[in-house]
């Protein structure tokens, strides 16, 4: 099989339940007009550094839960207790 030349070609070869296919068909390239949604995407992008995007997508729901559904106001009020909770959450990427 010839190597796909783009992300779109790659996801066309995937089963509809694959996280990359779902992401491509529901989020990738779609405009973001909600600040909380943009914040969520930024959290995922920041945590992706050095990892595969598929790894991040598999943890996306964990990130959403850990970061109060990406609610900017709630996350901005996090204090030591919440930071410690995040640092001990094995469902997300974390680093001291």
Image (cartoon, rainbow, N blue to C red):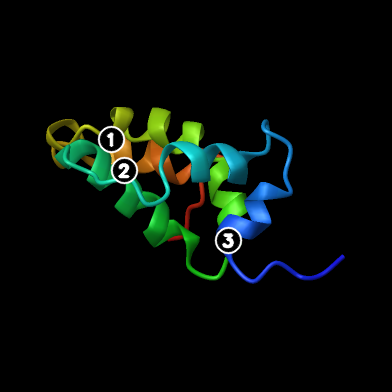
Q: Nearer the viewer, mark 1 or mark 3?
A: 3
Q: Which residue sits at x=44%, y=36%?
A: 26
Residue assigned mark 2: 40
Mark 2 nearby-residue class (10 Å; few <14, some 14–19, many ≥20): many
Measured from the top left, where is residue 4 in percent x and y? 70, 67
Residue assigned mark 3: 7
Along the line of sight, the residue nearer the viewer: 7 or 71: 7
Name the N-terminal-most of marks 1 and 3. 3
Q: CA distance from mark 1 to mark 2?
A: 5 Å
Measured from the top left, where is residue 43 in percent x and y? 34, 51
Q: Is residue 82 left or right of residue 56?
A: left
Along the line of sight, the residue nearer the viewer: 94 or 61: 61
Q: What SS does tag 1 mark?
A: helix
Q: Are marks 1 and 2 in contact (CB under 8 Å)?
A: yes
Q: Which residue sits at x=67%, y=31%?
A: 17
Residue assigned mark 1: 70
Q: What SS does tag 2 mark?
A: helix
Measured from the top left, where is residue 33 in percent x and y? 16, 41
Query: Which of the 4 image quadrants contains residue 67?
Result: top left
Q: Are marks 1 and 3 in contact (CB under 8 Å)?
A: no
View extreme (right): residue? 1
């Amino acid at each position: 099989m010839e190597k796909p030349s783009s992300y779109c070609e790659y996801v066309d070869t995937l089963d509809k339940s694959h996280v990359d296919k779902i992401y491509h068909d529901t989020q990738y390239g779609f405009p973001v007009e909600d600040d909380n949604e943009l914040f969520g995407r930024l959290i995922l992008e920041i945590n992706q550094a050095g990892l595969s995007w598929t790894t991040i997508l598999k943890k996306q729901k964990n990130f959403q839960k850990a970061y109060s559904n990406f609610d900017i106001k709630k996350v901005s009020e996090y204090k030591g207790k919440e930071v410690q909770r995040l640092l001990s959450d094995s469902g997300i990427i974390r680093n001291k």
